[in-house]
């Protein structure tokens, strides 16, 4: 097929991009490795930021989210037996999170593409993308030209699948962490900066005896524990475990016992954890690519960067990338202005690093490192409590943190 923008990957990034482009009169096709059912059932993130929801609403992509999602404007820190409530909505003029499972958002976005006659090609793994067949195939000499001005010249880019080729003006790699689009960058542009944290998070999807109303972060000598609201009588529970631990090392009884210990200081009752429906381990890694564009190829979402789950930033950053790129492509097709396409990579890297730094800050607040745990833990815990206190009391520290936490800064272009 021939189209204007070819997109690899029907995750949140690819689906938002395709929808916004089509609504603006720019043709787009998505190719997706998995089946439609797989895409619509994969449970992952579930916390959408204020600005992201405003963006989806403005583009008519949030009807069900607004009808069925629930809002959260505060979280709590449990530290040294005290529950310290951080009312971030009050600190940001009312900005709140929305709780809406990622797979529901994916389902809604696919339905909209279907209505537009552009249902993604499911079961269609891309085997290669060609960013700029006429603009330098990755040699040093062709590089600068392709990187600096490849987005303006004529010539088709291409996505190759086993039974389908998508010819397009631009290719966008929204194919997640293990996608293939990155590999089309010349070797010396493919690098990324990565960090491995010295712990992982055991994650449990559990039934709870009553609705979890806000995110709870327990900062404890034994390690971090978190309880996150999910809809329908469920909650997502996180437990800090040593880096590299497998879920198998955490039978339910052990997980329950550590969770109870870490939440034990709470003076009043917390929701009780019932049946465990799912267990896994989230590896705590961060990564940011060095280049998110080469010629007619752009990378967005997890293909461009990886966030730890702390602060629930990954999904939101993926949508923000899509929003930025959609805006730049509209400027190009409608106004003939390529300036924003040319500077896409720089803009998205700046945003990704900012978010990466915030996630890192939150992680450091929530975890005790091993040396502290084996000696200076009470001292460190007291310092952490002081820091939490500073966040929740009136003043600039909490206001800045609240804005970054809820994502109410002007980081998602209209
Ligand atoms: N060909 C076609 N599709 C592919 C290929 C391929 N070669 N490789 C991967 N894909 C598809 C995957 O099957 C998946 O559906 O790309 C999609 C990538 O989607 P996500 O991983 O959800 O990535 P993204 O849209 O960037 O969203 C990232 O979602 O769950 C969160 O933690 C994640 O929050 C982050 C956000």
Image (cartoon, helix red, strand yellow):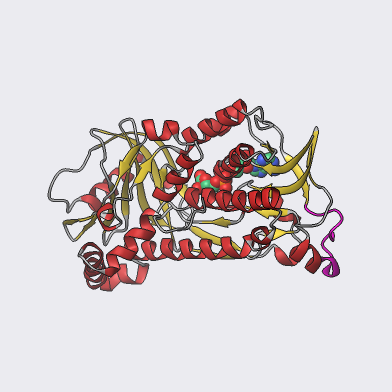
* In this view, 354 is above or below 108: below
Q: Position of residue 158 (x, y in %)?
A: 79, 45
Q: Is residue 141 magenta?
A: yes
Residue drawn at the location 54% of the way across and 56% of the way down: 306
**121 on left or right of 376:** right
**Quarter of the image where ligand 1 sits:** top right
Q: Nearer the viewer, residue 107 or 361?
A: 107
Q: Position of residue 118 (x, y in %)?
A: 66, 30
Residue drawn at the location 32% of the way across and 56% of the way down: 224
**356 on left or right of 381:** right
The boundaries of the magenta stretch are 131-142
Residue drawn at the location 82% of the way across and 48% of the way down: 156
Q: Position of residue 209 (x, y in %)?
A: 23, 33
Q: Is residue 367 visible?
A: no
- Number of numbered tags placed on the structure image: 0
**Magenta stretch secondary structure, dominant:** loop
* In this view, 383 is above or below 167: below
Q: Position of residue 350 (x, y in %)?
A: 54, 65
Q: Nearer the viewer, residue 307 or 86?
A: 86
Q: Is residue 312 magenta?
A: no
Residue drawn at the location 42% of the way across and 40% of the way down: 279
**61 on left or right of 22:** left
**404 on left or right of 303:** left
Query: The N terminus appears in which quarter of the rendering?
Result: top right
Q: Is residue 167 visible?
A: yes
Residue furthest out toward the left: 267
Residue 256 occupies which quadrant of the picture? top left
């Amino acid at each position: 097929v021939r189209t204007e923008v070819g997109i690899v990957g029907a995750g949140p990034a690819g689906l938002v991009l395709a929808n916004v482009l089509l609504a603006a009169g720019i043709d787009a096709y998505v190719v997706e490795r998995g089946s439609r059912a797989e895409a619509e059932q994969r449970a992952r993130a579930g916390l959408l930021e204020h600005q992201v929801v405003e963006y989806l609403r403005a583009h008519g992509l949030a009807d069900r989210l607004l009808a069925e999602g629930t809002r959260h404007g505060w979280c709590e820190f449990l530290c040294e037996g005290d529950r310290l409530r951080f009312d971030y909505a009050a600190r940001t003029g009312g900005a709140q999170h929305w709780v809406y499972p990622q797979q529901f958002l994916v389902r809604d976005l696919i339905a909209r593409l279907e209505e537009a006659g552009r249902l993604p090609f499911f079961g269609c793994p891309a085997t290669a993308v060609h960013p700029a067949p006429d603009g330098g195939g990755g040699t040093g000499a062709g590089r600068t030209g392709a990187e600096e001005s490849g987005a303006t010249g004529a010539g088709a880019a291409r996505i190759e699948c086993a039974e389908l080729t998508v010819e397009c003006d631009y290719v966008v790699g929204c194919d997640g962490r293990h996608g293939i689009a990155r590999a089309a960058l010349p070797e010396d542009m493919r690098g990324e900066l990565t960090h491995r944290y010295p712990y992982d998070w055991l994650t449990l999807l559990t039934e709870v005896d009553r609705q979890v109303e806000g995110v709870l972060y327990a900062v404890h000598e034994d390690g971090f524990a978190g309880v996150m609201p999910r809809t329908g009588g469920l909650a997502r529970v996180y437990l800090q475990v040593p880096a590299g631990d497998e879920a198998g090392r955490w039978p339910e009884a052990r997980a329950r016992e550590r969770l109870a210990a870490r939440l034990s200081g709470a003076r009043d009752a917390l929701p009780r954890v019932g049946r465990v429906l799912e267990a896994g381990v989230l590896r705590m890694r961060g990564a940011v690519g060095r280049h998110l564009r080469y010629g007619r190829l752009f990378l967005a979402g997890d293909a461009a960067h990886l966030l730890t789950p702390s602060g629930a930033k990954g999904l939101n950053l993926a949508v923000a990338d899509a929003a930025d790129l959609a805006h730049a492509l509209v400027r190009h097709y409608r106004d003939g202005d390529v300036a924003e396409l040319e500077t896409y990579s720089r803009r998205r890297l700046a945003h990704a690093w900012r978010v990466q730094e915030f996630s890192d800050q939150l992680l450091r607040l929530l975890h005790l490192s091993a040396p502290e745990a084996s000696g200076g833990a009470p001292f460190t815990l007291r310092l952490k409590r002081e820091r939490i206190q500073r966040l929740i009391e009136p003043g600039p520290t909490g206001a800045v943190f609240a804005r970054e936490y809820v994502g109410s800064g002007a980081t998602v272009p209209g």
